[in-house]
Amino acid sequence: MKACSVVIKMPIVISLIVSVGVIALLAGCSSSSENSKSGSSGEIVTSLYPIEFIVSKIIKDDFEVVNLTPIGVEPHDFELNVNSTERLLSAPLAIVLGGGFQPVIEKTAKNRSGQTLSIFETFSQGNGNFEDMHFWLDPIKMQSVVKSITSALIKLNKSQAAQYEVRSKALQTELADLDDLYKTSLTNCEIRTFITSHNAFSRLAERYDLEQEPIAGISPDTEPSAKRIEELKSLVKNKKIEVIFTEELVSPKVVKILGKEAKVRTSVLSPLEGLTKEQESKGEDYFSIMESNLQKLVEALRCEIQI
Ligand SMILES: [Zn+2]
């Protein structure tokens, strides 16, 4: 924690001159909170872990990367406080999801004067319909987001363009390898349907020819109707489903009730919307969690892995 208190006792004229410096100093204090890294020359504001992950991989220590959604918090409908609003407005680059995923953040970002990248807009330019915004669960969609983010970062810091391109390419190759792993692991499976707690996995399902049946809707806090629960119970029976997936950042209550009623076990599949404190302290990241998701899918869908 840096000391930010400034005590001034001096005649009015001098204090007027000095106050400009003091304001600048205080402004510096307010923007350098617990996330500060030394040597940073500004902040890049994001609001979701997978975006923060991409930015950090490409810029290393050139800027401080701020994720407005704190560790362990569910990011749908996340509200801003005074400090995070100020950071969102003043950062030289802000990357928002768009598409109504985090309405308050998206609305506030409209008042920014600096560069703002809306991921939804980059997608909707190509194909109008993008109902499920959880693109990061599809490594190929994630690759195209890496490209958009790289362009925004180069626009912000042209002097490092060559470095950013190299790191961006390396990240895209890693994502291509992850896609290969998913493809081969999910080729020969006994069943292709999986039940999740909210509609986060339709991009992933589409990519690997699977079928996702979410208990709730787009946002994890939507309660399912009694009719939906009955539908899912017969689905479990008809498709011989043995596992129902819950997730880390929301209460698994509904999933557990359904699991009990349908006599199946539950397992955690991460929508990767944020890391838990435990995952962070274990050094988990996007790739390690995507791989552990794959293992759980392979088990639940009873896939034969061919090596
Ligand atoms: Zn979600």
Image: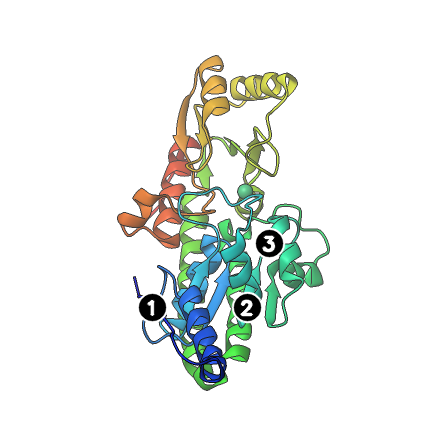
Depth check, mark 2 against mark 1: the one in front is 2
Question: Horizontal placement of 207 versus 265: left or right?
Answer: right
Asked which secondary structure carries label 2, the reply is: helix
Q: Distance between the residues labelled 3 and 1?
A: 24 Å
Q: Can residue 143 be seen in this view?
A: no
How many residues crowd mark 2 within 10 Å: few (<14), some (14–19), many (20+)? some
Q: From what the image shows, is residue 217 above or below residue 21? A: above
Depth check, mark 3 against mark 2: the one in front is 2
Question: Which residue bears the numbered disc 1?
Answer: 37
Question: Which residue bears the numbered disc 2?
Answer: 90
Q: From what the image shows, is residue 263 above or below residue 306? A: above
How many residues crowd mark 3 within 10 Å: few (<14), some (14–19), many (20+)? many
* Along the line of sight, the residue nearer the viewer: 87 or 234: 87
Could you tell me the amino acid type at mark 2?
Ser
Q: How far apart are marks 3 and 2 (CA)?
A: 13 Å
Could you tell me the amino acid type at mark 1?
Lys
Q: Distance between the residues labelled 2 and 1?
A: 18 Å
Residue 34, picture quadrant:
bottom left
Could you tell me the amino acid type at mark 3?
Ile
Q: Residue sitting at 52 percent across and 17 percent down?
A: 237
Residue 220, picture quadrant:
top right
Mark linked to residue 105 = 3
Q: Residue sitting at 57 percent across and 47 percent down?
A: 203
Mark linked to residue 189 = none
Asked which secondary structure carries label 1, the reply is: loop
Q: CB under 8 Å between callouts 3 and 1?
A: no
Q: Where is residue 192 in the image (x, y as percent from the top left)?
A: 51, 34
Q: Where is residue 36 in the image (x, y as percent from the top left)?
A: 36, 65
* Along the line of sight, the residue nearer the viewer: 31 or 58: 31
User: Disc 3 or 1, which lies upstream in sequence?
Assistant: 1
Q: Where is residue 55 in the image (x, y as percent from the top left)?
A: 45, 66
